[in-house]
Image (cartoon, helix red, strand yellow):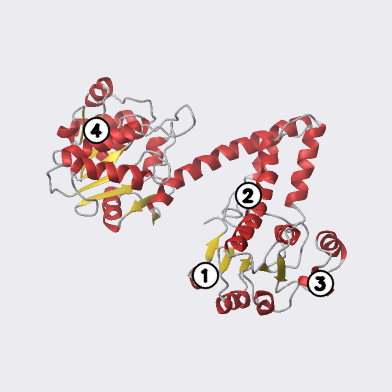
Amino acid sequence: MNVTLFGLGYVGSVTATCLASRGHRVVGVDTDAVKVAALNAGVPPVLEAGLDDLLLRVVASGALRATESVRDALVDSDVSLICVGTPSAPNGSTDLRQVRRVVREIGRVLAGSARPHTLVVRSTVPPGTVEDVVVPLLEEASGRRVGEGLQVAMCPEFLREGTSVADFFDPPFLVVGGSPEAAAAVRELFGFVEGPTHEVELRSAESLKYACNAFHALKVSFTNELSRLYRLLDVDSREVMEVFVGDRQLNISPAYLRPGFAFGGSCLPKDLRSLLHLARMNCVDLPVLQGALVSNEMVVRDVAERVLDAVESGGEHNRRVALLGLSFKHNTDDLRESPNVALAEMMLGKGLDVRIHDPHVNASLLTGANLRYVQERLPHLQKVLHEDAADALRGAHVAVVSTADPTVIATVLAAAPPVVIDLDGRLGRPVESLAGYQGVGW
């Protein structure tokens, strides 16, 4: 393909060189004359392992050249890649000035041309940027309509400085947001990349890079927080984490990384509190771990507020709420520190008529610590707990569903309450198609 790439920094120079090495004809564009001259001389504008020799070969073969002229670069172009910087503004927002400038320049050159063209954003941009900024600017500057020979896509990069060449050829996956036509062009461009390709919504593609980087930052902070405390407890955190990362079933895995309701149970809250207590006793601040408890409580409070809003918007003549699922985890009757118990407590405290059903909870069979916990938090559980899901749902204005039990799902579909708040995320398309459906985090 004939490729025009805008921005010859770390991401751009590596991307341009690697694409050219796989048979594409690439023209790099940058406003920095020094970068342009360096690349045309076969000298990398940035320091990256493996880039030197690769760049020399593609420049010598004519597969890659650089220019300051946007019009010159787009003469025979099939695809434009935007790899310009998106730095932080003083208030923390993303500075999109370079993206806006490049989109306008591309649009002006494409004006009056009927040649098919695909614009692909690789720069990290906030969700909604492509739809709300890029597309309107491109259409205004070009006088063309996106979707009519002109396509726009989002394809985030996952390159680490220092290993970006290796990362380019062996990414964890290829992610594309955009129309099927735009996705097809990106697939062709990166056809040499092995591994899975995910075609997602534009906003999901934009959001993914933020999720990845936030998680990477969280991992670093989490590990360093533990090490600050463990050092004072005479624990070698290196040894702890060496074993920790060997767990691919729970620790380094998809486990616990599915959007849903708050955590609970007899382990996670208790052990977090224990670590925080040890930290206080040793005068160590652990804001990340403290934030985990605070964030967890916010999830529960947010759902309680949404239930109240739903009742109020319905005129408050019907304050009946069905809570389907009470235990902290599926297929168990363990109510200890269950966020569903906390939610029920909040809703009852607000004067709502709460009716509860859990296919695995029988109040008469609760014993020990499980019984003591629910007696303290929901002393009148026996009065609000229903053996049958249909009884709990009868006449309810809001159904809060935290279990994917097939019987419960079938009952929700049959009752079709005005509002359904899904805390599970696995209720299925029929439930999500109900008029009053809303997800806890989607």
Instruction: Indicate the amino acid at tag 2.
Output: Asn
Circle 4 packing at 10 Å, graded few (<14), some (14-19), many (20+), is many
Q: Nearer the viewer, residue 386 or 199?
A: 386
| Earlier-in-chain disc, 4 versus 2 | 4
Would residue 17 be visible to someone looking at this image? no
Considering the numbered disc 4 on the image, is that residue within a helix, a strand or a loop?
strand
The residue beneath circle 2 is 251
Q: Could you tell me residue 105's position as x and y percent?
A: 22, 35
User: Spatial distance from mark 3 to mark 4, Cα to Cα?
Assistant: 70 Å
User: Spatial distance from mark 4 to mark 1, Cα to Cα?
Assistant: 46 Å
Q: Say which of marks 3 and 2 sits in front.
A: 3
Contact (Cβ within 8 Å) of mark 4 with mark 1: no
Q: Say which of marks 3 and 1 sits in front.
A: 3
Using residue 233 as the reference point, say whether residue 57 is left or right of it. left
The residue beneath circle 1 is 428
User: Spatial distance from mark 3 to mark 1, Cα to Cα?
Assistant: 30 Å
Q: Say which of marks 1 and 2 sits in front.
A: 1
Q: Is residue 120 above or below residue 366?
A: above
The residue beneath circle 3 is 382
The residue beneath circle 4 is 28
The image quadrant that residue 423 belongs to is bottom right
Q: Nearer the viewer, residue 294 or 229?
A: 294
